[in-house]
């Protein structure tokens, strides 16, 4: 049996923190590898639907600090299916966070046994001037921004992380060594975020390649407001990504929101 736990809103995972963090995440280590926990926890991340603070957390970074858990964040239907298949076949606990704002998007689905390896990012668009690393719905904002930037003569490389744990550092570093610039777009709070982890990785291992300061575009460190109109203001969009890319590639002093 390989159970899939449907948690509905991601914040309901908090009600099982001891079972998740203190039991499932540590069981294989505590038993010297004798115990297997092929279990998947699926949770929805609600965006801009008036779900308010108790139902709107983007908690992937919080759980990323728990060794023993694998964490994936698909940006589309095809990856959601492929990552879910990989998670079910994994012998350890895997968390899948699904961005609800992507549910209406359609994609062509492979007919074969489609598996997306956990821990492998995808270069969605190649470029030479700036690397944009994103996850969840921010991937589509990044692609929209890249199209706009191309019209202005700036070629952006867009990377979809897909997996938070393990993090595909090699793909990120390879891209930054080529472009010399990095923008990380993460629709979660800034402090101790995945954006911070990506930025720290590049500073530690590819600092000599940087030609401009790293920019992190995230949500602010505040509870999510109830009003959808206010909530939508929290998340990085294509316009903010374009402004950040212009700043790091052209030396613009325009403020990045």
Image: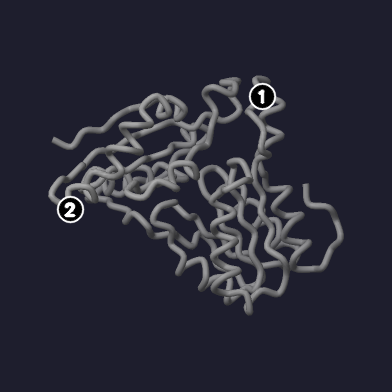
Q: Vertically, is 253 above or below 7?
A: below
- Secondary structure beneath dot 2 equals loop
Q: Residue at x 13, y 49 (%)?
A: 34
Asked where in the image residue 178 lies, by quadrant, the reply is bottom right
Q: Tag 1 or tag 2, which sits nearer the N-term?
A: 2
Residue 188 screen position, x and y as percent: 58, 41
Q: Which mark is residue 115?
A: none
Tell me, yes or no, whether the two marked residues, 2 and 1, touch with CB atoms within 8 Å: no
- Mark 1, other Cα within 10 Å: few <14 / some 14–19 / many ≥20: some
Residue 90 seen in the figure: no
Left-right relation of 248 to 98: right
Residue 107 seen in the figure: yes
Q: Please name the colour scheme applied to the rendered image.
A: one colour
Tell which tag, 2 or 1, sits nearer the viewer: 2
Left-right relation of 1 to 238: left
Q: Vertically, is 76 above or below 7?
A: below
Q: Residue at x 73, y 48 (%)?
A: 239
Residue linked to disc 2: 32
Residue 170 screen position, x and y as percent: 45, 69
- Secondary structure beneath dot 1 equals loop
Residue linked to disc 1: 225
- Mark 2, other Cα within 10 Å: few <14 / some 14–19 / many ≥20: few
Q: Vertically, is 113 above or below 234?
A: below
């Amino acid at each position: 049996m390989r159970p899939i736990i449907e948690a509905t809103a991601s914040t309901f995972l908090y009600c099982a923190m001891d079972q998740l963090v203190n039991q499932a995440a540590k069981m294989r280590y505590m038993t010297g590898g004798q115990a297997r926990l092929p279990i998947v926890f699926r949770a929805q991340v609600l965006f801009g639907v008036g779900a308010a603070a108790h139902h709107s957390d983007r908690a992937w970074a919080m759980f990323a600090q728990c060794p023993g858990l694998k964490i994936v964040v698909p940006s589309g239907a095809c990856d959601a299916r492929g990552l879910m298949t990989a998670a079910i076949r994994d012998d350890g606990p895997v968390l899948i966070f699904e961005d609800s704002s992507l549910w209406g998007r359609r994609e062509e689905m492979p007919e074969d046994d489609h598996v997306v390896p956990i821990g492998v990012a995808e270069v969605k668009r190649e470029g030479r001037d700036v690397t944009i690393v994103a996850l969840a719905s921010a991937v589509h904002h990044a692609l929209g921004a890249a199209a706009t930037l191309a019209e202005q003569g700036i070629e952006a490389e867009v990377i979809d992380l897909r997996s938070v744990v393990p993090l595909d550092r090699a793909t990120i570093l390879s891209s930054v060594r080529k472009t010399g610039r990095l923008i990380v777009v993460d629709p979660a709070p800034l402090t101790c975020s995945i954006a911070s982890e990506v930025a720290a990785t590049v500073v530690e291992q590819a600092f000599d390649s940087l030609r401009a300061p790293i920019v992190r575009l995230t949500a602010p460190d505040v509870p999510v407001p109830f009003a959808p109109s206010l909530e939508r203001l929290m998340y990085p969009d294509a316009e903010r990504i374009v402004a950040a890319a212009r700043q790091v590639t052209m030396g613009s002093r325009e403020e990045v929101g």
